[in-house]
Image (cartoon, rainbow, N blue to C red):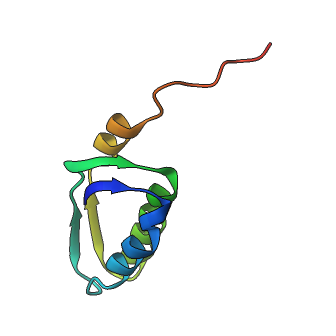
């Protein structure tokens, strides 16, 4: 994955993931990804679970994704 992954590119991302051969080992490299939004993250998570359930293997460094793309700030706690 490279550049920016937002809801605008969601159909293209979904198409690319669905085009991968079944029962293969797929490495999703996020090193060159500048940004990813929640809709694309949700798609990748759901797809990877479905892909694995059909015999494929998805390798992605989720810790790296979360570290790099976690929200910069959190909502204040209301008391």
Residue 13 position in % (x across, y down): 37, 71
Q: How many labels does the image show?
A: 0
Instruction: Name the outermost residue toward the front.
Output: 8
Res 44 quadrant in image: bottom left
Please give the name of the residue rendered at 45% of the width and 27% of the height, measured from the top-left corner.
72
Residue 54 position in % (x across, y down): 39, 83
Quadrant in which the N terminus is drawn: bottom left
Please give the name of the residue rendered at 33% of the width and 53% of the height, measured from the top-left corner.
4
Left or right: 25 with respect to 79? left
On screen, residue 66 above or below 1:
above
On screen, residue 16 above or below 65:
below
Residue 40 position in % (x across, y down): 45, 59
On screen, residue 44 above or below 74:
below
Please give the name of the residue rendered at 43% of the width and 36% of the height, measured from the top-left corner.
70
Please give the name of the residue rendered at 38% of the width and 39% of the height, measured from the top-left corner.
69
Front in this rendered view, residue 37 or 42: 37
Residue 7 position in % (x across, y down): 49, 61
Left or right: 29 with respect to 67? left
Res 5 quadrant in image: bottom left
Instruction: Name the outermost residue toward the right.
Output: 79
On screen, residue 64 above or below 14:
above
Front in this rendered view, residue 4 or 64: 4
Quadrant in which the C terminus is drawn: top right
Res 48 quadrant in image: bottom left
């Amino acid at each position: 994955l490279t550049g920016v992954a937002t809801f605008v590119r969601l159909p293209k991302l979904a198409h690319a993931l669905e085009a991968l051969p079944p029962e293969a080992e797929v490495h999703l490299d996020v090193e060159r990804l500048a940004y990813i939004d929640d809709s694309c993250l949700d798609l990748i998570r759901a797809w990877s679970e479905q892909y694995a359930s059909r015999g494929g293997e998805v390798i992605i460094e989720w810790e790296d994704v979360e570290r790099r793309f976690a929200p910069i700030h959190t909502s204040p706690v209301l008391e």
